[in-house]
Image (cartoon, rainbow, N blue to C red):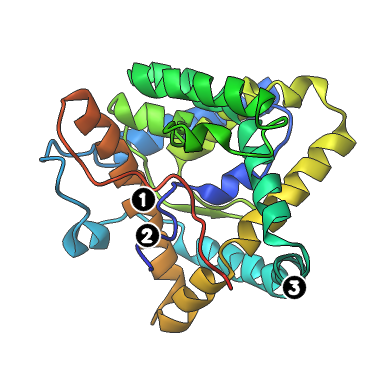
């Protein structure tokens, strides 16, 4: 169960929807990213059926650990008093078909991010599936509320720019745990900024719509993983270290999967979402 959590790298970043960062803020972040990429280790060329080992996890770069642990505890506090209670209410009160429809609808809106990234990663079949899913679910699926495409055999395909950079051979750099955003890295932080820039909603939707979308997305994601996160927290000796290690495992495995696909090597089946039966 624990290995499913954070299998989708930096899932929490999808909760945050905001306009692209201004150029004066983006340039320092790019510089930080480049320094982190140079300092971080590149992904080794290993066979696709290998996953991150305990020794590799032990080598994770975490030079900002005191700061990261502090923000980690701050995030846990606000999760405990705000997000988790609301997500628990949402999961217990809202009928499951409506929850599924909300999740499907929000995911359908991510197509402008998924499509260019799958193409940039050289996954043309996945890009085709993304387009088929969007056209099918947006029409027959009533604006994406029903995942009709999955019933036709077109399972969910995703892509994000942090993963794209990894496929291009750029290392993730050191570990970051940021307020609200949660687990991240210089590579994923820049990738998230690019993903936001690819999202038309960041330009054309009102701020109220963006805030509503972010809030509902966060509640929906948290509600789908209530039991999973509780289990992880209760069984971890060092919860912070566990989340950090799983985050880097998820990043490494996601990039290796794309590389293995490009080389025609079979890999572990894709876990396209974090959904857990929190019943």
Question: Which residue position holds label 2?
Answer: 246
**Proximity of marks 2 and 1: CB atoms separated by less than 8 Å:** yes
Judged from this view, the residue extending furthest toward the left is 47
Q: CA distance from mark 2 to mark 1?
A: 6 Å
Residue 85, which numbered label?
Answer: 3
Residue 250, which numbered label?
Answer: 1
Where is 148 relative to 83, above or below?
above
Query: In the rendering, at what x and y percent does residue 183 appear?
Result: 50, 54
Image quadrant where residue 147 sits: top right
Mark earlier in primary sequence (1, 3): 3
Query: Going by the image, does 268 lie left or right of 225?
Result: left
Q: Few, some or many C-alpha atoms within 10 Å of disc 3 (few <14, some 14-19, many ≥20)?
A: some
Q: Few, some or many C-alpha atoms within 10 Å of disc 1 (few <14, some 14-19, many ≥20)?
A: many
Element under disc 2: helix
**Proximity of marks 3 and 2: CB atoms separated by less than 8 Å:** no
Element under disc 1: helix
């Amino acid at each position: 169960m624990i290995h499913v959590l954070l299998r989708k790298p930096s899932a929490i970043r999808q909760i945050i929807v905001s306009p692209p960062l201004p150029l004066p803020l983006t340039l320092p972040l790019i510089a930080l990213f480049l320094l982190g990429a140079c300092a971080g280790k590149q992904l080794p060329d290993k066979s696709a059926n290998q996953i991150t080992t305990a020794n590799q996890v032990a080598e994770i770069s975490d030079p900002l650990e005191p700061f990261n642990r502090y923000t980690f505890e701050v995030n846990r506090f606000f999760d405990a008093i705000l997000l988790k209670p609301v997500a628990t209410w949402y999961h217990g009160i809202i009928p499951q078909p409506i929850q599924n429809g909300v999740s499907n609808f929000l995911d359908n809106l991510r197509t402008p991010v998924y499509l260019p990234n799958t193409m940039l990663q050289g996954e043309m079949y996945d890009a085709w599936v993304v387009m088929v899913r969007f056209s099918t679910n947006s029409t027959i699926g009533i604006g994406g509320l029903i995942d009709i495409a999955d019933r036709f055999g077109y399972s969910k395909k995703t892509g994000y720019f942090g993963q794209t950079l990894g496929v291009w051979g750029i290392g993730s750099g050191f570990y970051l745990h940021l307020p609200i955003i949660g687990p991240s890295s210089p590579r994923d932080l820049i990738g998230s900024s690019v993903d936001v820039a690819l999202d038309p909603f960041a330009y054309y939707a009102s701020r109220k719509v963006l805030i509503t979308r972010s809030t509902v997305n966060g509640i929906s994601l948290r509600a789908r993983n209530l039991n999973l996160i509780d289990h992880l927290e209760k069984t971890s000796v060092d919860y912070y270290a566990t989340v950090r290690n799983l985050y880097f495992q998820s990043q490494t495995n996601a990039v290796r999967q794309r590389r293995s696909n490009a080389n025609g090597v079979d890999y572990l089946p894709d876990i396209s979402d974090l959904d857990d039966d929190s019943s």
